[in-house]
Image (tube, rainbow, N blue to C red):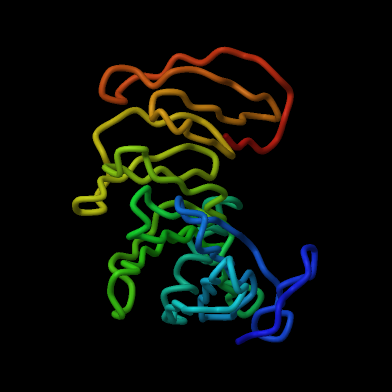
């Protein structure tokens, strides 16, 4: 039996490495912690909440050339350069995490704009991986019905869980967002302002109402 941990005692997976994101699964029985600085390797540690012991580690190695291409494209867009080159060794890491409502899928948003999804009911590697944004994927969250995955950097995008392809719905400017458990209400942050509203019919429209000043949100 593993030794009991005191409430407030820090968790330090992988020898106290820098950590970038945390998320509880809907049952409250598992806690996922993402590694922020992993070079070209992504790691997420899944803890059993009762024992606070790691029960699974999921990971993915990113091809170095792929990271260089991502960084180069980002630099060109920011500077308008045509011959820019990455100045430092590419770094990947997890900056956002989310479980699906049934606890089956775990999605990670990365420092270089990628989304990686694991099926936790299987022992295999990632189920899906794609380039979603330019730079940090600040937020990822599944819809309440499990049909879509939402992600954001400077805009919110939606992806169909059936094939992980873009959903034919509206996108909104946002840095961070949160979907209400009822699946109808959404809060998002834009330029430090929290905007709250309803997703329209089928999620194709959104009406926002200004409320509070803020930076990050969570229901």
In-image side of 11 versus 137 (left or right):
right
Q: Is residue 185 above or below residue 140?
A: above
Residue 75 in picture, x, y percent from top left: 57, 59
Residue placed most toward the observer, 206 or 79: 206
Q: Is residue 53 above or below residue 100?
A: below
Residue 150 is drawn in which quadrant?
Answer: top left
- Count of marks overlaid on the render: 0
Residue ranking furthest to the left: 162
- Which residue corresponds to the image point at 51% horizontal and 16% vertical from the top-left? 208
Residue 159 in picture, x, y percent from top left: 31, 45
Quadrant of the snapshot with the C terminus: top right
- Which residue corresponds to the image point at 42% horizontal and 74% vertical from the top-left? 66
Quadrant of the snapshot with the N terminus: bottom right
Q: Is residue 21 above or below residue 14?
A: above
Residue 135 is drawn in which quadrant?
Answer: bottom right
Residue placed most toward the observer, 192 or 209: 209
Residue 102 in picture, x, y percent from top left: 33, 52
- Which residue corresponds to the image point at 54% horizontal and 36% vertical from the top-left? 177
Residue 68 in picture, x, y percent from top left: 49, 74
Q: Is residue 212 above or below residue 31?
A: above
């Amino acid at each position: 039996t593993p030794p009991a941990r005191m409430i407030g005692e820090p968790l330090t997976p992988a020898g106290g490495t820098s950590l970038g994101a945390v998320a509880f699964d809907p049952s409250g029985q598992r806690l996922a912690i993402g590694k922020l600085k992993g070079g070209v390797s992504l790691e997420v540690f899944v803890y059993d909440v009762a024992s606070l012991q790691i029960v699974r580690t999921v990971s993915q190695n990113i091809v170095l050339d792929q990271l260089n291409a991502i960084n180069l494209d980002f630099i060109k867009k920011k500077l308008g350069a045509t011959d820019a080159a990455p100045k430092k060794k590419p770094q990947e890491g997890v900056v956002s995490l989310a479980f699906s409502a049934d606890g089956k899928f775990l999605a990670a948003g990365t420092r270089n704009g990628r989304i990686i999804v694991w099926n936790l009911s299987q022992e295999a590697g990632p189920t899906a991986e794609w380039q979603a944004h330019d730079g940090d994927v600040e937020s990822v969250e599944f819809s309440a019905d499990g049909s879509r995955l939402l992600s954001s950097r400077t805009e919110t995008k939606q992806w169909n869980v059936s094939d992980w392809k873009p959903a034919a719905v509206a996108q909104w400017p946002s840095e961070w967002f949160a979907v209400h458990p009822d699946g109808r209400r959404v809060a998002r942050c834009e330029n430090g302002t929290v905007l709250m509203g309803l997703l329209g019919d089928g999620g194709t429209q959104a009406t926002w109402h200004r409320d509070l000043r803020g930076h990050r949100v969570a229901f």
